[in-house]
Amino acid sequence: MKADSNLKKVLTQNVFAVTAECGPPKGADPGVIKKKGNLLKGYVDSVNVTDNQTGVVRLCSMAACAILRQEGLDPILQMVTRDRNRIALQSDVLGASSLGIRNILCLSGDHQSFGNQQQAKGVFDIDSIQLIQTVRRMRDSGQIIGGEALSDPPELFIGAVANPFADPFDYRVIRLGKKAAAGAEFIQTQCIYNVKRFKEWMKQVLDRGLDKKVYILGGVTPLKSARMAEYMSKQVAGMDVPGDVIDRLKGVDPKDQRREGIRIAVETIGALKEMEGVRGVHIMAIEWEDAVPQIVEEAGLYPRPRISEE
Amino acid sequence: MITAERKPMAEIKAMLAPYRKILVVGCGTCVAECASGGEKEVGLLASALRMDAQIEGRTIEVREMTIDRQCVYEFIDKLTGVADRYEVILSLGCGAGVQAVAEAFPKMLVIPALNTTFIGETKEPGLWVENCRACGDCKLGYFAAVCPVTRCAKGLYNGPCGGSKNGVCEVDPDTPCAWQLIVERLENTGRNDLLEAIYPPADWSRQQGKGPRKIAREDQRSES
Ligand code: SF4
Ligand code: SF4
């Protein structure tokens, strides 16, 4: 029963890891999650489940993770601090572990004003770094905030995110260092389109030796069209889609743009595989989960390793 | 200062509808500075009410009065002997002023004319910005005098989030990213040592406590 995180096993055995993202439905049907999970099964090592992403109410991440686990996948529970205070967060951390969920990704979350509950009170009792620290202390010292002891500590592989494309640029790596110091073990980055800037960031990561402290998984999102690329570039906060990527998509017939988007994603993964310090890829094919198997295959990352249970 | 904005006229009128004798009370401190509840605004609002009644053919009696501070009893006392000649007090004080006046006159109806908004500064004429949420545990010393609790949309103690771009906040492009300011000011003031510090979870009991907070100081009491 006490299975370890598959993601952790893959990473500790020095295999280039593949994770993908699964967005839960705006409804109570478990079938949607099972379907998405089965599309990804065998092609990825672990699956992230988003937590009411962009402040839109969806089926909860914990339940979706439990369903994915039943389906034989290794889920990564995304947990944002926007909606729950420290009582609820710590309680959910215990609950997740009790359900056999073995990975957690700690985030602050998108602001509630972006979503479909704009009049909601944003909680932000603690922030992502404080959440990382909290989960780490619960796991390693068996203590909750304030020091009280747990009867049984949770078992979780602890992750966080990093955005190399946000500002202030030079502070980004410092913030990554803070996340590592707080106790993060793996990092998934924002979608990479600007490979040059990502490389600059990775150089700073290597200079500080942070690649030795955390496993870094580069984020990749296939673009469906030139329009999507333009939208992401202009409308999505903290996203860097350079003009040449947009032009490349514009240069092909609209009906072939999806194909081109996949090609770009595969090339990006190719570049990531060569980059020192990058230990895997995180594919976020938003509402396009069926693109993942193709990308994984074309990137030469299929089949995924079967890590034996010890 | 405490800032406030006047409520929409329709809302004020609806609340005042049943009454004919109205005492409009302004406050000469914070809300005068932010041009929402001082003597001038009291005059404007009272005239508007009178004119409105005239147009609609109602007779009302409106008296204007502005006191130095609606949140301090010795100033509120100026209303004694006047207030009870009216059916209702329309207060242009902040929320604290409205309640202090109501407490001083247990039998008087007191209605707010303002929406109290925040603690802030006058940035330029006609522009007020929020910069303190009275968390009860001021940490400005660690954040280069830029408050993350108030000025970061997510109240991040260990920011900036991934949405900070070109110096502005992802939530509102008209607002500077507090963390961009914090990082810049820490560097400019030679406090690079604080850039890597991890701040532990805040003690919100200092802000939320056990309900309303109070400050009791014996030294101040014994003097009066
Ligand atoms: S840290 Fe607290 S007291 Fe200080 S400015 Fe911010 S909210 Fe106000
Ligand atoms: S962009 Fe800056 S101010 Fe806005 S939420 Fe993020 S860290 Fe806070």
Image: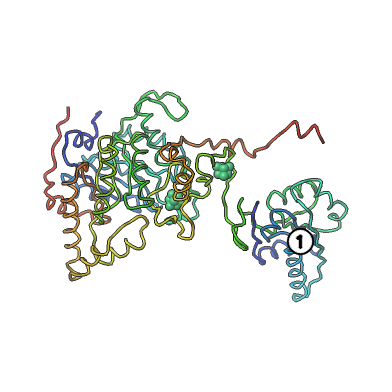
Q: Where is residue A177 drawn, in percent x and y?
A: 34, 39
In the rendered image, which quarter contains the C terminus of chain A? top left
Helix, strand or loop at mark 1 = helix
Q: Residue at x 57, y 39 (%)?
A: B138
In the image: residue B159, left or right of residue A162: right
Q: Is residue A147 above or below residue A43?
A: above
Residue A111 showing in the rendered view: no
Q: Which residue lies furthest to the right in this view?
A: B81
Tell me if residue A164 comes above or below residue A72 in the rendering: below
Give the residue pinned by disc 1: B39
Q: Decide which of A212, A68 is in the foreground and name it.
A: A212
Is B135 in front, or is B129? B129
Q: Is the distance from the Cβ of mark 1 to the nearest ligand 1 atom less than 8 Å?
A: no
Q: Would you place residue B24 above or below residue A122 in this image?
A: below
Residue A146 horizontal side relative to residue B10, left or right: left
In this image, A278 relative to B125: left or right? left
Q: Check the image and tell me how it is coloured.
A: rainbow
Q: Is residue A138 left or right of residue A265?
A: right
Q: Position of residue A94 (x, y in %)?
A: 37, 32
Report which quarter residue A279 is drawn in: top left
Q: Where is residue A280 in the image (x, y as percent from the top left)?
A: 21, 43
For mark 1, name the chain. Answer: B
Neighbor class of circle 1 (other Cα within 10 Å; few <14, some 14-19, many 20+) is: many
The three-letter amino acid code for the residue at tag 1 is Glu
Query: Residue A42 at x, y = what percent?
Result: 15, 44
Number of numbered tags placed on the structure image: 1
Q: Which residue appears at 46% of the width and 36% of the height? A: B199
